[in-house]
């Protein structure tokens, strides 16, 4: 199930290293991606679940209600901020965390039957083959996954975070982050090797399966089908408590605490995080509700 997660779900977690050919076919829906509101007498926090990567010209997710929430918000807060003007900054963090000496050869980290697929995927990256032997398994997984998403025709620049960040910046509104690039990457760096190897296998599996699963996830998001999103993540992560804790549970709890602190300050803020964090058991909303906050779904 972890292999399905990397093929379908990481784009719905908004992770910085998932980079962005046939584009998945997406039907328009009369519904819309889910939007929530947490409110008291002088503070409003909007919660919007995002998809980090989208096909080019995919704008069906914007609605008048959502645009009104954007207009009302004085600040945007994302999971993390990537300095696109200085990509070396993220690259240096990736190099510090994602490379080590004394690792087993990358080919030894997948079953023998899957080594041809691994070598074919590595060749597509145009990165020197020897570098993969020095990569931590999770880092190699993300490097290879970037090629998979490029083949799907989805891009980070088309993703919700990138679009919102440009919109708020153009309006002169500040944009903040819930965690740093290093913090995000550290979640994967600390994963047990078995979980990392599952991710590696997922990054080289059948592109057609990835296309189908990504399209299903994207359709669920566009139609606001939070139940399906939550069920998918719970099922995909049921075999790895370590991965679920690293990607979802701890982060959701931390973010709910941030929102709770923010509720003590007047104003209106939009918090836009991967849709998987706002669905299923242990979601950000559940944590907030357990603390006595009323969370209202707006769309």
Image (cartoon, rainbow, N blue to C red):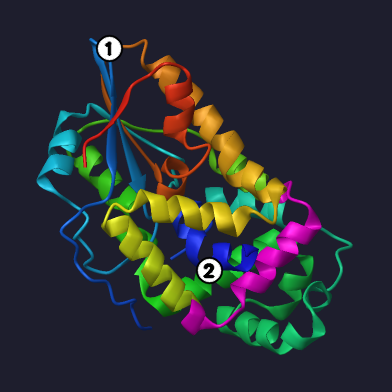
In this rendering, is residue 58 above or below 266?
A: below
Residue 234 in the image, given as x and y percentages of width and height: 55, 52
Depth check: give the residue in front, 93 or 150.
150
Residue 204 in the image, given as x and y percentages of width and height: 62, 77
In the drawing, does residue 70 fall left or right of residue 186? left
At horizontal 44% and vertical 24% (from top left) the residue drawn is: 288
| Within-10-Å neighbours for mark 2: few <14, some 14–19, many 20+ | many
The magenta segment is 189-209
In the drawing, does residue 107 fall left or right of residue 36? right
Position of the C terminus, as image quadrant, is: top left
Residue 114 in the image, given as x and y percentages of width and height: 72, 84
Q: Which residue is mark 1?
A: 266
Q: Tell me where residue 28 sits by quadrant.
A: bottom left
Q: Which residue is mark 2?
A: 7
Depth check: give the residue in front, 276 or 21.
276
Q: Tell me where residue 60 sits by quadrant.
A: bottom left
Q: Is residue 86 visible?
A: no
Residue 16 in the image, given as x and y percentages of width and height: 50, 52
Q: Residue furthest left?
A: 64
Per the model, the C-alpha gap separating discs 2 and 1 is 40 Å
Secondary element type, mark 1: loop
Say whether residue 190 is magenta: yes
At horizontal 21% and vertical 36% (from top left) the residue drawn is: 298
At horizontal 33% and vertical 21% (from top left) the residue drawn is: 294
Depth check: give the residue in front, 148 or 283.
283
Position of the N terminus, as image quadrant, is: bottom right
In this rendering, is residue 247 above or below 114?
A: above
Q: Earlier in the sequence, mark 2 or mark 1?
A: 2
| Within-10-Å neighbours for mark 1: few <14, some 14–19, many 20+ | few
In this rendering, is residue 281 above or below 10?
A: above
Q: Main secondary structure of the magenta part?
A: helix
Secondary element type, mark 2: helix
């Amino acid at each position: 199930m972890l292999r399905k997660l990397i093929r379908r779900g990481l784009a719905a977690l908004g992770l910085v290293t998932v980079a962005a050919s046939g584009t998945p076919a997406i039907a328009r829906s009369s519904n819309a991606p889910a939007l929530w509101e947490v409110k008291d007498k002088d503070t409003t926090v909007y919660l919007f679940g995002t998809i980090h990567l989208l096909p080019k010209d995919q704008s069906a997710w914007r609605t008048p209600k959502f645009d009104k929430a954007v207009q009302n918000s004085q600040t945007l807060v994302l999971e993390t901020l990537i300095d696109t003007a200085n990509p070396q900054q993220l690259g240096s963090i990736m190099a510090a965390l994602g490379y080590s000496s004394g690792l087993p050869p990358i080919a030894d980290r997948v079953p023998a039957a899957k080594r041809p697929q691994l070598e074919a995927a590595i060749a597509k990256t145009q990165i020197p083959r020897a570098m993969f032997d020095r990569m931590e398994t999770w880092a190699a997984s993300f490097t290879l996954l970037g090629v998979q998403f490029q083949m799907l025709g989805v891009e980070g620049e088309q993703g919700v975070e990138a679009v919102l960040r440009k919109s708020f910046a153009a309006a002169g509104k500040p944009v903040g982050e819930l965690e740093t690039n290093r913090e995000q990457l550290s979640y994967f760096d600390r994963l047990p090797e078995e979980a990392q190897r599952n991710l590696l296998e997922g990054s080289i599996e059948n592109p057609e399966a990835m296309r189908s699963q990504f399209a299903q996830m994207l359709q669920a998001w566009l139609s606001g089908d939070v139940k399906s999103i939550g069920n998918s993540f719970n099922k995909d992560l049921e075999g790895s408590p370590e991965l679920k804790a690293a990607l979802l549970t701890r982060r959701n709890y931390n973010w709910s605490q941030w929102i709770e602190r923010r509720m003590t300050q007047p104003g209106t803020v939009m918090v836009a995080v991967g849709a998987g964090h706002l669905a299923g058991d242990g979601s950000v909303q559940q944590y907030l509700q357990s603390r006595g906050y009323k969370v209202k779904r707006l769309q």
